[in-house]
Amino acid sequence: MPGPPLLQAFHGRRPGVLPVWFMRQAGRSLPEYREIRQGVSMLESCLRPELAAEITLQPVRRHGVDAAVLFSDIMIPLKLAGVAVDIVSGVGPVVDEPVRTGSDVDRLVAHEAGDPAAVAEAVRLVVAELGDTTPLIGFAGAPFTLAAYLVEGRPSRDHLAARTLMHAEPDTWRRLMEWAADVTGQFLRAQVRAGARAAQLFDSWAGALSLPDYTDHAAPYSARALSHLDGLEVPRVHFGTGTGELLVAMRDAGADVVGVDYRIPLDEANRRLGGRTPLQGNIDPAFLAAPWSVLERHVRDVVERGRTAPGHVVNLGHGVPPTTDPSVLTRIVELVHSL
């Protein structure tokens, strides 16, 4: 299959150059990002097309990665739908009015998906600069993660309120998840229609669920979100943290590629997935601040384990920490390309 190495790997092929990009590659680790973001809130920066496009392109220029990923946030679809949400420094996403009851869900589902025109314009600006050689990956949060934030109102360690609602009021949970799936699915579709050539659904909190709970109460809605990409012929990546026991269910929700976090080796992930699914991952972000000899050994081990899969895109097993030295990421890209 001709085309960029990333897309070849996503289709289960082995390109001449092993592709690599990093989740959260655009962001706080880059001095140029911190400079351009001065005085602009996180969510506002995602909704200014020229600014979002420039931030998206910064790591491609600096590191030579094989893909750009749209600078966005999983809260953007909620923001566009009129939900009162903000990113609070030192806390994370905070929802003004958490969704805890059936009447709360009634109020929420009255919100229609907002206009993604600003995000689509950012995609078009990025694609115009990248051309055909470097693909842009669209990005959205999975329904369970969105629902967890909506119910808890802010980040949580155990997502107890969300999991309680799931079991105590299954019909309320179903309506909440259907709404979240459609809002985030439409957001992802808008990015692809504007020019993104792959799409990633990110489930930050799926690892809080048991396999039966994930299969019954989360996976059907990830499938619903991904179904919004039907007919668009782009590879679909599904990634979550703490999801080693959920990999098969995540793949079967409609993913072409499974992202693997740092907790499970890639060869074991490949075994669990039956040896037929391209993988993405899974350098442990903790190694980024280690001596280069230690990090290099780890990267080589990840690459070697990834050879067991039909296709492999090197990435982190989570996002780039804000304290990361950018030159380390550039050096990893050079190393991976040399392998």
Image (cartoon, helix red, strand yellow):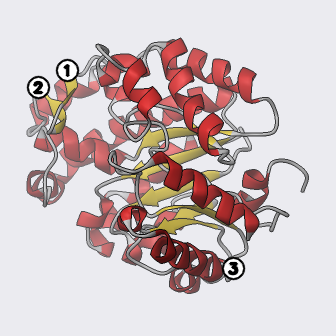
* 190 sits left or right of 101 in the view: right
Q: Earlier in the sequence, mark 2 or mark 3?
A: 2
**Identity of the residue furthest to the right in this view:** 2
Residue drawn at point x = 28 percent, y = 40 percent:
175
- Mark yes or no: residue 328 visible: yes
Residue drawn at point x = 64 percent, y = 35 percent:
61
Q: Quadrant of the N terminus?
A: bottom right
Above or below, 233 against 191 in this view is below
Q: Earlier in the sequence, mark 1 or mark 3?
A: 1
Tell me the kind of residue under disc 1: Ala
Element at badge 2?
loop
In this view of the protein, which residue sits in the foreground, 151 or 270?
Answer: 270
* 149 sits left or right of 193 in the view: left
Instruction: Tell me the CA gap for discs 2 and 3.
Output: 46 Å
Residue underneath mark 2: 96
Residue drawn at point x = 61 percent, y = 45 percent:
63
Query: How many marks on residues?
Result: 3
Residue 87: x %, y % from top left? 22, 29
Residue underneath mark 1: 84
Number of residues whose C-alpha sits closer than 10 Å to that of mark 1, classed few (under 14), some (14–19) or many (20 or more): few
Above or below, 320 against 187 in this view is below
Tell me the kind of residue under disc 2: Asp
Dot 2 and dot 1 residues touching (CB under 8 Å): yes
Number of residues whose C-alpha sits closer than 10 Å to that of mark 2, classed few (under 14), some (14–19) or many (20 or more): few
In this view of the protein, which residue sits in the foreground, 291 or 233?
Answer: 291
Instruction: Tell me the CA gap for discs 1 and 3.
Output: 45 Å
Instruction: Tell me the CA gap for discs 2 and 1.
Output: 6 Å
Residue 103: x %, y % from top left? 10, 30
Residue underneath mark 3: 307
